[in-house]
Structure formats: C-alpha cells, structure tokens
Amino acid sequence: MREKITRYIRAGYAGLYLVSHEEQRVEAELKAVATELNHALYAWSVTEGLIDTGKGTVRDCGEPLEVLALVGELPENSILLLRDFHQFLDEPNPVLVRKLKDVIHEARTKGRTIAVLGCRLTLPPELEREIAIVEFALPDREQLRVVMDGIVASHNETMTKGRRQRLTAPDGNAATTLLDAARGMTTNEAENAYALSLVESGALDPAIIAREKAQAVKKNGLLELIETNESLDTIGGLDVLKNWLLKRREAFTPRAAEYGLPTPKGVLMLGIPGCGKSLTAKATASVFGVPLLRLDAGRIFAGIVGQSESNLRSVIQTAEAIAPCVLWLDEFEKGLSGSKSSGSTDGGTSARVFGSLLSWMQEKKAPVFIVATANDVSQLPPELLRVGRWDQLFFIDLPNREERERIWQIQIAKYTREPESFDLAQLAKVTDGFTGSEIEQVFVEALYRAFDRGDEPTDLTIGEVLTEFVPLSKFMAEQIGALRTWTKGRTRPATTPALERRERKIAV
C-alpha cells in the first residue's frame, strides 16, 4: 500500500481518499511515504486542529472550511491528512465541496496532496473524478507477525523487570497457526487479542485469539464467524453432494496449487426447507478445514446513501483477509429479491450491490469458497444462475427411504439413545414426506412425552407423535411440486436418483 500511495504522489495526484478503520496504521504509512519523498506531513482533526507532525506545532482550526482555507499557506511538497473528513461529505455543504475542489486543483500545481481518511467511502458526485481511492486491505501475515513479535518483546521486557520467565517468539507451524488465528483483524484488534491471550493463559493461545476474532468480525453485524463441529457424518444421505465436496477437500492446499487446479468458486444449494442445506454449509467448512463465515445478505442494505456498497466492500475485505475460508450466504434469495425492481424502489441500490457481488464472485482470486442456500428459486435473479457463476447447482429434495432411516439413526444417537432400540426401517417408512428437521422434531416431542411419563421413548411413543404431526410436504405440496419441476435439467440432484441406485445394485 505504501508503494501505491508513493506512486500516486509522484504522479502528481493531488486528491486521495484513504479507506480504512486503522487510523494509526494509515498515518504510519503516510509518515514513511513523506520521509521517502522528503515531503512535510500535516494532520487535521476537528478536536486537535492542524498539526505539523514534523515540528509538533498545532494551529487551532476546528472547522473543515478553516483548514481548507489554510492549505494555500502550507509549503510546497507537503501532504495534508484530513481525519474523519468523510463525515462532512455525507450530506455536504455545497460551499465545502466547491472549496475542496478548488484546493485540489491548486494543490496539483504546488506539489501538495490532500488525503481524506475515513472508515467508509463517501464521495459526492462533484468530487468522484477529482480524488483517487485507496482502500487499505486488512493486515497480511507479515504485518501481523510484526504485531505479534512486538507483543512478545513487550511482554519479555515486563517479565525481565519482574524477574519472571521470558517467552520465545513463536516460529514454524506454531507461528503460522497464531497468525492464521488473527487474520481478518485490524492491527489494533490483533494486538489486543495477543495481549489478552498472554494475560489469560500466560502464552499465545490460538483458541483465545480465534475467539476474539469472532467477536471482532461480529461488530458490524454483517458477518459471523461460526464455530461448528458438524461433519459429513452428521448428514443423512445427500451422497452425490458429499462425494462432490470430498473430491475438493484439498482444493486450498499447496499441492492443489502446484498441480494447477483452479480455486473452486462455490456451490448453490436449492431445496425444501429443513432438508439439510444449512447443515451441509457448516459441514463444508469442516471438509476443507477452514473457517466458516456466515453472511445474512439482508443486512448489507442500509438506509444511508452509499452505506450498502460500503457494507459489501467490508464483507469482501474481511472474507479475503481470513481466506482460505467458506463464506455461507444463508437464505440468499431474501437479500437479493429486491434487485429486480431496484430502480423504482431504492434508487438502484440493490441492483448496484448485486452487480458488485456478481463481479466479485466471477473475478475473485482469493480462496473464498461460497456456499449459498436458497428456498425460493423464483426470487433469485437469472444472472445468478447462469453457467460459470458456480461450480455446481444442487437440488436438495425430501429425503428418500434410505436417507430417512439414516436420519433417524443420527437423531436418536444425537440425543444419547440407542438406535438399535428402535425399528428404524419402519420409522423411515411411516415418515415418508418428512424433512430431516421434522424427523428431529418428532423425536424431540417423543422425548418430552416419555420424560413426562417417567420412562424412555419407544416406537409407540413416536407413533403417537406422528398421528398429530402434519409435515411441510402436505400443506406446501404445490410449491414443492413447482420447485421440483423447475430444477429438472437445471440443477444436479444432491442424492443419487432411485433408478440409478437400482441399476447399481443389479450391476453388483
């Protein structure tokens, strides 16, 4: 990033917009750039006024128009950093916009650079062609290594004064694990997490750092870092989908890169609610051995102009910083259903966000595997479903008899009962048309009834529950039928069709 800013200034760019949450890191980069180019560096904020960072002198000017009026007094070959100036550009005063535009034009002839620093991009149309955008990515492993080594050195200095045991800077696999645990955090967040780990455990603990990263990721309410123990063994059936995932389980390894395998894009799972889409999304992260990020697409959209686009950029930046990872887009159709009528309902915001998302999905280089789940395919824009957008589109139907038997086995064992104590084949037969989640709910209800009676659940208890239970497939028969019709020839079944299974048995 330092080299990019240096090139802009050397090329004569007078206006820069630096997008980052890390004010200290950005200022450190600008100081290094100013030193390299032999430029003076000034910084302004509402609370502190105009500071000459070299001499330490301060000039009192708390209004944005005041500091812009002083730009002409700055020496040639200087950089002016405007902290939090993006807040004045949300609903800008026309006079402020005009003044900033004039200052940038004049600065171009004097070797001055005006750098706006903000946590999100907010530019009025009048300034879009006047200012170059520089988005700071979250720190990489090398930058996090500097932070970690600094924490270890600081800790050892404290330990030396107290005559206690010193720490050795982690190296090799231990260092890689610690750095991976902090990827996706800012330098300040990583520093706090490393320090907290030392306080809590007396050592650098990846589990503590990962826990703090999960909290950091959740701050903006867009992404959630999910800890999951789910695996393919906890899914009843879906053999085609499982085999497809297993063939890609080493897709993010160095061996795959050496072989020349392209990074997998992702998978879209369409299907009936309660049939295992979310469970499969969680298990996918376990298959690949990478973190799982969950995004609620509806949360991207915000009321402030430009905020929705900024939210999407934040999501992409975090996912790429944590990569390799799985990005789970849950109930994808709900977040994008408004893109079709976006021009008349929200000024085109949904359409722009949707277009940016599609472009990223198509062009992304970072190893981010996208798992999207959707229940209502009619709400998905056609552009999302075209060939090449995903590695595969799977349809997850109601479980067949073999799958229901396996689901009963899994659910009974999940609640610490012996599957052998039940007639699994008969249970699978009488629950034709039930989803996996409905089978679980039936057994949970049987547990409650048995608990109330003071005994253990039996086939008879489950039968009592089934007489009162109406599955989704009955009161949504028309919608399920329409979905099945649409998916034929458009998607790949997640389960081997019945005809193919019979042919395989005959061949054996």
Image: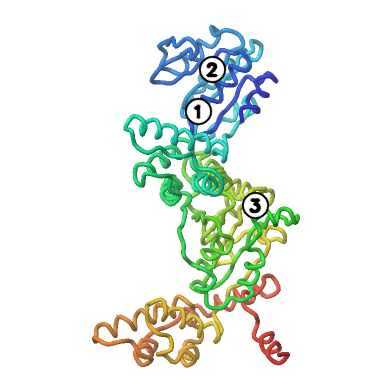
Residue under label 3 = 361
- Amino acid type shown at disc 2: Leu
Task: Name the element at disc 2.
Answer: strand
Name the residue: 53% across, 66% down. 283
Task: Work out how far the residue at label 1 is from the one at label 2, CA to CA, in angstroms.
Answer: 17 Å
Image spot of residue 221 (x, y percent):
44, 48
Image spot of residue 448 (x, y percent):
30, 80
User: In which quadrant is the N terminus drawn?
Assistant: top right
Left or right of 307 on screen, residue 38: right
The vertical placement of 144 against 410, above or below, is above
Task: Name the element at disc 3.
Answer: helix
Of marks 2 and 3, which one's residue comes earlier in the chain? 2
- Can residue 301 be seen in this snapshot? no
- Amino acid type shown at disc 1: Leu
- Can residue 488 be seen in this snapshot? yes
Q: Neighbour class for label 2 at 10 Å: few (<14), some, many (≥20)?
A: many
Task: Work out how far the residue at label 2 is from the one at label 3, CA to CA, in angstroms.
Answer: 37 Å
Residue under label 1 = 89
Of marks 1 and 2, which one's residue comes earlier in the chain? 2
- Amino acid type shown at disc 3: Met
Name the residue: 59% across, 13% down. 39
User: In which quadrant is the C terminus drawn?
Assistant: bottom right
Q: Are marks 2 and 3 in contact (CB under 8 Å)?
A: no
Of marks 3 and 1, which one's residue comes earlier in the chain? 1
Could you say which disc has been placed on residue 80 in the image? Answer: 2
